């Protein structure tokens, strides 16, 4: 299978409500979609980079540039298959989210042509995945409690609270006091703390959290290992885990007791399987992280989250958690779960009219 070319779509997806983390507030998701076109059909990929390099060093404009100038040209003449894309792209350093978007589009077109669902290709063992939800930093505790109550009413199986210095112990205590000890609860700091804040992390121990996600900077594996010795709550890494090699190092160092896997962060869904396997062989549970994906990335994430060692609810929420209207058929929460797509490839497509309406820029890159 040869690549005729790639169509890049830049779409703006307004969020139903502002989403605030320790590194900023989002009100619109600035999304780059990749459509790979071949003689045997087309396939879709989603780049999860944000508008600015705040979650990681990648950002959407840079991803588009590296896809146009380097990644698509690198696929010229390549016999496209699930195993030939990454070697063709890996000679370029970094840009994991850009590479992941291109690889996802090729995985989609190849697996659609073969009639194989992505979940089957990845080794899924479930037909539904348990869903958690990520709750942003709020202006007041009452506002937080309303949001958490709403999500629990919708059936979410796990609540994740974004935290930052000044918004940590108090909101966690308030959620525990209002909703009790049985609610599966975790926090995500997005690298906002340092080892000097160990007392704050220790102060979270009494609340029986499932995990503390990425409290320290992404390059501070030794700091996380030191913190893990001083707190009872398991440490989960997100931003730090950029490959299976780093996952192995983090686990061996005692820096991660749980791992959040995001295909975009590690360079693609096949790399995500490598991280999954590296964690599984070391008895480290994983869960599927989220980057406010549209239904395209969400479909692929749900397929990934159906793999054996994804034993904790992921940030695989319903489409409506972020978008009043998704670019695909919306993913709907049923008894706290999302159904794993069963159609070939990623199993979903953008609705042409919605895509046309949301598209701010489109560009064809010949293969
Ligand atoms: C813009 S924040 C994206 C990164 C963040 N993602 C979430 O909190 C979950 C977002 C989602 O539900 O897709 C994380 O660090 O885990
Ligand atoms: Mg995170």
Image (cartoon, helix red, strand yellow):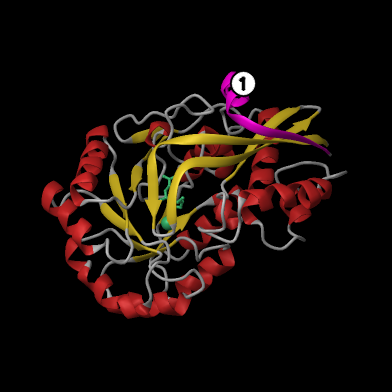
Q: Nearer the viewer, residue 114 or 166?
A: 166
Write down the residue under mark 1: 352
Among the 4 quarters of the image, the one containing residue 355: top right
**Position in image of residue 284 (x %, y %):** 41, 62
Magenta span:
349-366
Secondary structure beneath label 1: helix
Among the 4 quarters of the image, the one containing residue 204: bottom left
Magenta stretch: residue 183 in it? no
Q: Is residue 290 left or right of residue 84?
A: left
Q: Is residue 99 visible?
A: no
The N terminus - image quarter: top right
Q: Residue at x 11, y 53 (%)?
A: 177
**Position in image of residue 81 (x %, y %):** 74, 42
Q: Does residue 298 lie above or below 279 as drawn?
A: above
| Quadrant observed for ligand 2 in the rendered image | bottom left
**Position in image of residue 38 (x %, y %):** 79, 31
**Pointer 1 residue Cβ closer than 8 Å to ligand 1:** no
């Amino acid at each position: 299978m040869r690549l005729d070319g790639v169509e890049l779509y830049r779409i703006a997806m307004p969020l139903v409500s502002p989403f605030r983390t320790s590194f900023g507030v989002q009100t619109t998701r600035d999304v780059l979609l990749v459509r790979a076109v071949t003689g045997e059909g087309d396939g879709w990929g989603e780049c999860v980079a944000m508008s600015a390099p705040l979650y990681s060093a990648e950002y959407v404009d840079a991803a588009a540039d590296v896809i146009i100038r380097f990644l698509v040209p690198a696929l010229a003449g390549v016999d496209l298959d699930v195993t030939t894309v990454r070697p063709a792209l890996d000679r370029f350093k970094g840009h994991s989210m850009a590479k992941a978007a291109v690889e996802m589009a090729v995985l989609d077109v190849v697996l659609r042509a073969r009639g194989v669902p992505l979940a089957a290709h990845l080794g899924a063992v479930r037909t539904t995945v348990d869903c958690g939800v990520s709750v942003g930093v709020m202006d007041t505790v009452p506002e937080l409690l309303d949001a958490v109550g709403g999500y629990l009413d919708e059936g979410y199986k796990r609540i994740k609270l974004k935290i930052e210095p000044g918004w940590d112990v108090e909101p966690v205590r308030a959620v525990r006091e209002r909703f009790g000890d049985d609610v599966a609860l975790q926090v995500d700091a997005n690298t906002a703390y340092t080892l000097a804040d160990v007392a704050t992390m220790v102060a979270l121990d009494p609340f029986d959290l499932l995990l503390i996600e990425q409290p320290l900077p992404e390059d501070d594996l030794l700091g996380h290992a030191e913190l893990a010795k001083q707190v009872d709550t398991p440490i989960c890494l997100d931003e730090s885990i950029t490959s299976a090699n780093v996952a192995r190092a983090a686990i061996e160092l005692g820096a991660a007791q749980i791992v959040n896997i995001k295909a975009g962060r590690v360079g693609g869904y096949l790399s995500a399987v490598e991280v999954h396997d590296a964690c599984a062989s070391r008895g480290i549970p994983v869960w599927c992280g989220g980057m406010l994906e549209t239904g395209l990335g969400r479909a692929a994430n749900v397929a990934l989250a159906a793999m054996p060692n994804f034993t904790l609810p992921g940030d695989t929420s319903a489409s409506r958690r972020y978008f009043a209207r998704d670019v695909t058929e919306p993913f709907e929460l049923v008894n706290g779960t999302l159904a794993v797509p069963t159609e070939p490839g990623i199993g979903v497509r953008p609705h042409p009219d919605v895509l046309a309406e949301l598209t701010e820029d489109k560009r064809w890159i010949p293969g």
